[in-house]
């Protein structure tokens, strides 16, 4: 892990990346700044406007549905050779339209329209921006490229959340939509020269293939399906943990454990901020270190770290000074997530041939949307019934251990 000790100056560090990859990372930074405020603060805004929890939940669910549809369509378009930059421009314009609706929303109908557009924009954005990384890495290792852009994402979300929190304290929370519009305009400017490359289509598969080549092609498809299925299951588990950090964990902290004392909102907020700082601080060094390892190693490290973190969260409920165990568990979970994010994306690229990377990225990014719906609802029901998070985190520990054998099913194309 010696690579973690290297500390080149910031300019040398930045200049090591290909020019186009730096452009993608910069674009993701700005997009994440805008998203940080909108995603984390919108529920608070509409709660203050008197919307019920079910109305806000319905809006989030509808956004996820539209995101599911647009992700799949985007994946198909990418595989047909559409430039990712064209799709990113569409995503930015739809996001701006969404911000305008949500900025002016004072009733449920306008809120729903804005959420539909928000989900659509996210569904177009994510497969396109993820596929942009390997396309623009040139001869640079794509694993390091993914580590870079994940760091940009984490930094952007952190900045956006801070801006949103400050605007909320100043009673100007709607400014989050203005910030997002500005960020989308900057993204449009960054990609204005249409630097994107088309993904080569598989239109030239020889129609005169003999029987053996057809059998080989089918066999490759079967291997791809087994690999992509394994990665999707692992991703659903890992993104559920990511979602639980924003839903189940805050609820667990304020309710307290069986013996662990409940925390007030201020201390809970400090602990969640600690988690966010861990993710931001560890993302690049861990991602860079794992770029020198096999992807299965990174996936196993991620699952073991996340599982142990969940086990410690469960145990913390049984201790009066369990908050110390909570802090230790968050370090393990941060290690798991920072291992997972770049490694899983790299594995999607490595198990997929050029002909199906678009739909593979669409399926991968869809896991984030599915988890953001299922995990909060399920965790809320478990904590409501048991009064604490012990059972929730124990279940997640078991699921994580159960996912470990799937890492052996990931077969790389190259």
Image: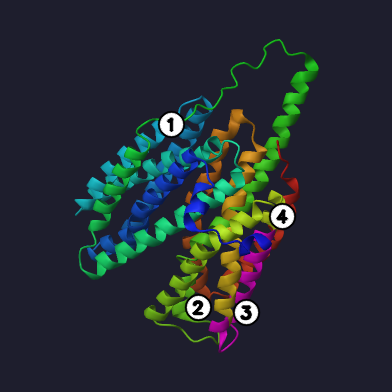
Q: Nearer the viewer, mark 3 or mark 1?
A: 1
The location of residue 294, given as percent across then percent down, is: 71, 50
* Crowd tier of the residue under label 4, counting other residues whose Cα lies within 10 Å: few below 14, some 14–19, many 20 or above: some
Q: Residue at x 50, y 58 (%)?
A: 9
Dots 3, 1 in contact, CB < 8 A:
no
Give how far apart the Cα atoms at labels 1 and 4 are: 34 Å
Q: Secondary structure at mark 1?
A: loop
Which region is colored magenta? 301-324
The residue that disc 1 covers is 195
**Mark 3 — residue?**
315
At a point 67% along the width and 12% down the height, the residue shown is 207
Q: Is residue 344 left or right of residue 177?
A: right
Look at the picture and state if 270 lies above or below 333.
Answer: below
Instruction: Report how far apart the C-alphas of labels 4 and 3 lie in the structure.
Output: 27 Å
* Residue identified by numbered label 4: 297
Q: Which mark is residue 387?
A: 2
Question: Who comes first in sequence, dot 4 or dot 3?
Answer: 4
Q: Earlier in the sequence, mark 2 or mark 1?
A: 1
């Amino acid at each position: 892990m010696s690579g973690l000790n290297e500390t080149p100056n910031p300019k040398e560090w930045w200049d090591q990346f290909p020019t186009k990859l730096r452009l993608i990372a910069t674009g993701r930074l700005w997009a994440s700044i805008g998203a940080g405020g909108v995603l984390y603060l919108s529920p608070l805004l509409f709660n203050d406007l008197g919307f019920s929890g079910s109305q806000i939940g319905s809006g989030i669910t509808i956004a996820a549905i539209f995101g599911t549809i647009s992700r799949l369509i985007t994946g198909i378009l990418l595989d047909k050779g559409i430039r990712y930059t064209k799709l990113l421009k569409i995503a930015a314009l739809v996001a701006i339209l969404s911000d305008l609706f949500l900025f002016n929303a004072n009733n449920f109908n306008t809120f729903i329209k804005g959420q539909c557009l928000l989900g659509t924009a996210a569904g177009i954005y994510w497969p396109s921006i993820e596929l942009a990384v390997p396309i623009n890495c040139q001869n640079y290792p794509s694993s390091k490229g993914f580590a870079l852009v994940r760091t940009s994402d984490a930094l952007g979300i952190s900045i956006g959340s801070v801006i949103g929190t400050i605007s909320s304290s100043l009673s100007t929370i709607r400014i989050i939509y203005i910030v997002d519009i500005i960020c989308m305009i900057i993204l449009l400017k960054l990609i204005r020269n249409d630097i994107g490359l088309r993904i080569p289509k598989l239109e030239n598969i020889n129609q005169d293939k003999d029987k053996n080549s057809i059998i080989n092609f089918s066999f490759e498809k079967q291997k791809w399906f087994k690999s992509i299925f394994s990665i999707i299951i692992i991703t659903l588990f890992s993104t559920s943990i990511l979602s639980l950090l924003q839903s189940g964990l805050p609820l667990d902290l304020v309710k307290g454990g069986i013996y662990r004392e409940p925390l007030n909102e201020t201390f809970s907020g400090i602990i969640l901020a600690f988690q966010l700082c861990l993710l931001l601080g560890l993302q690049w060094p861990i991602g860079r270190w794992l770029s020198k390892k096999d992807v299965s190693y990174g996936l196993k490290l991620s699952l073991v770290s996340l599982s142990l973190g969940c086990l410690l969260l469960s145990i913390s409920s049984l201790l009066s000074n369990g908050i110390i165990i909570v802090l230790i568990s968050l370090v393990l979970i941060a290690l798991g997530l920072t291992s997972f994010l770049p490694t899983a994306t790299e594995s999607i690229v490595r198990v997929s041939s050029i002909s199906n990377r678009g739909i593979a990225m669409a399926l991968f990014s869809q896991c984030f949307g599915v988890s953001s719906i299922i995990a909060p609802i399920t965790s809320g029901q478990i904590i409501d019934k048991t009064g604490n998070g012990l059972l929730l985190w124990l279940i997640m520990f078991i699921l994580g251990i159960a996912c470990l054998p799937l890492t052996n099913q990931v077969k790389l194309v190259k």
